[in-house]
Amino acid sequence: NAGVTQTPKFQVLKTGQSMTLQCAQDMNHEYMSWYRQDPGMGLRLIHYSVGAGITDQGEVPNGYNVSRSTTEDFPLRLLSAAPSQTSVYFCASRTTAAAGAAGGYTFGSGTRLTVV
Amino acid sequence: AQRVTQPEKLLSVFKGAPVELKCNYSYSGSPELFWYVQYSRQRLQLLLRHISRESIKGFTADLNKGETSFHLKKPFAQEEDSAMYYCALLGNSGGSNYKLTFGKGTLLTVNP
């Protein structure tokens, strides 16, 4: 049981480049989310999805796009990277089932992104 | 709107001393509260959830609805407890029951 898998673990981009951060979960969770973690800011919600084909914006969505074509995958796209997007990105998933939901979200190991 | 406040960015204690990490929340309904822990450069791990009323690694947390608090406590801190601790809130109605809102975290350092 792999849980939530994020790739890559590390990435360096030049300003203006684009890339996709991958996130996959094998727990058949309906809810998936992307967070960014910055010093002194905690974790802030970027985008989330409540199921395949349904996505919505979180607290800090600007500069990021997402899609949810399958239950398992929830990629995060940076269309034109900026230094302000240097951060650690975490993907998380959660089931809607009451018992499982009591456990909160399961997190991936993170992607450390640097934009120069 | 849901909000979580962790007033202390840094907390330093000596091994064997009691520790309390504070968390206050703002939410109009009855939320679910969690504590997550992140050891150096690792993924976030669920430590406690208020509905379980459990003790993990010696830590406990009690939900006080009157004070809207969910403080994390441990009577005798250990060096391996050094980590970043996040308090988080999950709403239970409408569009908030899948948004996990985090506080800004408290970095706990336990000195030998």
Image (tube, coloured by chain):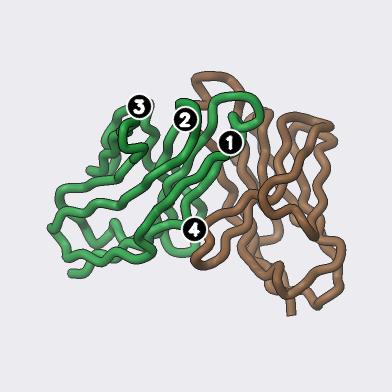
Chain colours: A brown, B green
Between tags 2 and 1, which lies in front? 2
For the point 30% across and 44% down, which residue is it?
B71
Mark 1 belongs to which amino acid?
Answer: Asn
Mark 3 belongs to which amino acid?
Answer: Ser
Place of residue A114 in the rendered image (x, y in percent of width and height, measured from the top left):
68, 73
Between tags 1 and 4, which lies in front? 4
Dot 2 and dot 1 residues touching (CB under 8 Å): no
Dot 1 and dot 4 residues touching (CB under 8 Å): no
Subunit under mark 2: B
Numbered circles on residues, count:
4
Mark 4 belongs to which amino acid?
Answer: Gln
Place of residue B73 in the rendered image (x, y in percent of width and height, measured from the top left):
24, 46
Between tags 1 and 3, which lies in front? 3
**At numbered mark 4, what does the secondary structure look like: helix, strand or loop?**
loop
Please name whichever residue, B22 or B55, is drawn nearer the observer in this view of the structure. Answer: B22
Locate the N terminus of chain B by quadrant: top right
Residue under circle 2? Answer: B31
**At numbered mark 2, what does the secondary structure look like: helix, strand or loop?**
loop
- Disc number for residue B42: 4
Cα distance between the residues tagged 2 and 4: 27 Å
Dot 1 and dot 3 residues touching (CB under 8 Å): no
**At numbered mark 1, what does the secondary structure look like: helix, strand or loop?**
loop
**At numbered mark 3, what does the secondary structure look like: helix, strand or loop?**
loop
Residue under circle 1? Answer: A1
Please name whichever residue, B18 or A52, is drawn nearer the observer in this view of the structure. Answer: B18
Between tags 2 and 4, which lies in front? 2
Cα distance between the residues tagged 1 and 3: 24 Å
- Which residue occupies the extreme left position in the image? B16
Cα distance between the residues tagged 1 and 4: 19 Å
Cα distance between the residues tagged 2 and 1: 29 Å
